[in-house]
Amino acid sequence: MELPKKWYNILADLPRDLDPPLNPITKDPINPKDLEVIFAKELVKQEMSKEKYIKIPKDVLEAYEKIGRPTPLKRAKNLEKFLKTPTKIYYKAEAYTATGSHKINTALAQAYYNKKEGVEKITTETGAGQWGSALALACCFFDIDLKVFMVRSSYFQKPYRKTIIETFGAKIYPSPSTVTKFGKEILKKDGDHPGTLGIAISEALELVLEDENAKYCLGSVLNHVLMHQTVIGQEVKEQFKEIEENPDTLIGCVGGGSNFAGFMFPFFNDGKEFIAVEPKPVPTITKGDYRYDYGDTAGMTPLLKMFTLGKDFQVPRLHAGGLRYHGMAPLISLLVKEGFIKPKTYEQKEVFEAALIFAKTEGIIPAPESAYAIKAAIDEALKKEDKTIAFNLSGHGLLDLQGYQDFLDGKLS
Ligand SMILES: *Cc1c(COP(=O)(O)O)cnc(C)c1O
């Protein structure tokens, strides 16, 4: 199978226009020039573009091949047998990329454009560490300095993510950290603060605003990030064509919305059922408000119209670190609001039970985040309908074994 040569931009096909991002100070629709202080110019252009397809640069395509694209689409036959279901279950194995999740798809694109524009340093945040690992490899390939702020609770829970990030030559700090004003302020109030993605984003942005040669990269939420992920769904479409199958239902987990968007956007006009799954304790699209909010905790990002629990939401500790975010991609939010995507929530424990069933039947230990999609797929298959479902296995869980150990020891709350 050949790699897709273009990214699909769903902005060309939306049922209505997205509400524009607002300047955090004036509250007016943002001027692209303001965004160029933070992001590479080409990425700002892509963020606003309504062109249906955007060509993937040759260097990025080569890098996609290097990290393992196209990834396999597999049928979960053992799982079907275990569930005694007539439903056919397929999964897209983003777990098979070099850094173990879908995040590398946008990391390579973002590093490439930054390099092309002469950017010397990049800062970013990371939750469970998948984004930090992916961007570290991408910055290593394209020779850019990288600083990563990793949510403190995950930093200590998943120490080998730090090893990966340092192996690829990037610097990493637990967030809240002592290298930014905002981090120090929070640590003064609570020296044991577990951190959140919102705080880590604020810290990464603070460094960029102080340094002309630095830019910021985000691993989810924004339009251009979701667009880069559409290589996933385009491959899936092609792979289903090759086996002369057609999925009825597409399922994915949502933290900021990027893996699910990449998986389902290319099917948007095909009359499928779309199910997005999130943790019950972080019920962004099931219980959040649809309104303008900041993407970070300090209030430095543009205001985005999205489902949000509020930027100061006390995000509970969860093993699915990538799903601990107060907001949701404006594009996914709009499609939930308009009824195109069905939201669903599950508790952590039932999700780990599903993860173990998948591990034992299919032989892959899934990322705790992906396990939310697996749980929904299992429930869907247990309806025992004669249909075909597919879920996105956004990553593997080989660096999340503490979560599995806690579950096996009966210590999971
Ligand atoms: C980051 C991450 C997620 C959540 O982020 P999205 O932007 O919603 O995809 C889900 N699964 C894995 C494996 C991740 O690394």
Image (cartoon, grey):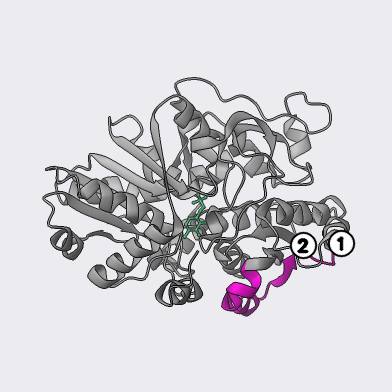
* Above or below, comparing residue 54 to residue 134 in the picture: above
Within 10 Å of disc 1 (Cα), the crowding (few <14, some 14-19, many 20+) is some
Where does residue 303 sit, x and y in percent of width and height?
Answer: 71, 33
Residue 115 falls in which quadrant of the image? bottom right
Asked if the beta carbon under badge 2 is closer than 8 A to the nearest atom of ligand 1, the reply is no
Which residue is disc 1 drawn over? Answer: 184
* Above or below, comparing residue 271 to residue 164 in the picture: above
Nearer-the-camera pick, 390 or 405: 405
Q: Which mark is residue 176?
A: 2
Instruction: State which region is magenta.
Output: 154-179
- Residue 32 visible in the snapshot: yes
Element marked by disc 2: loop
Where does residue 154 sit, x and y in percent of width and height?
Answer: 62, 68
| Mark 1 vs mark 2, CA separation in Å | 7 Å
Name the residue rendered at 40%, 54% in the picture. Answer: 372
Label 1 sits on what residue type? Lys
Q: Is residue 110 left or right of residue 386?
A: right
Within 10 Å of disc 2 (Cα), the crowding (few <14, some 14-19, many 20+) is many
Instruction: State yes or no: discs 1 and 2 in contact (Cβ < 8 Å).
Output: yes
* Above or below, comparing residue 386 to residue 179 in the picture: above
Name the residue rendered at 34%, 38% in the picture. Answer: 274
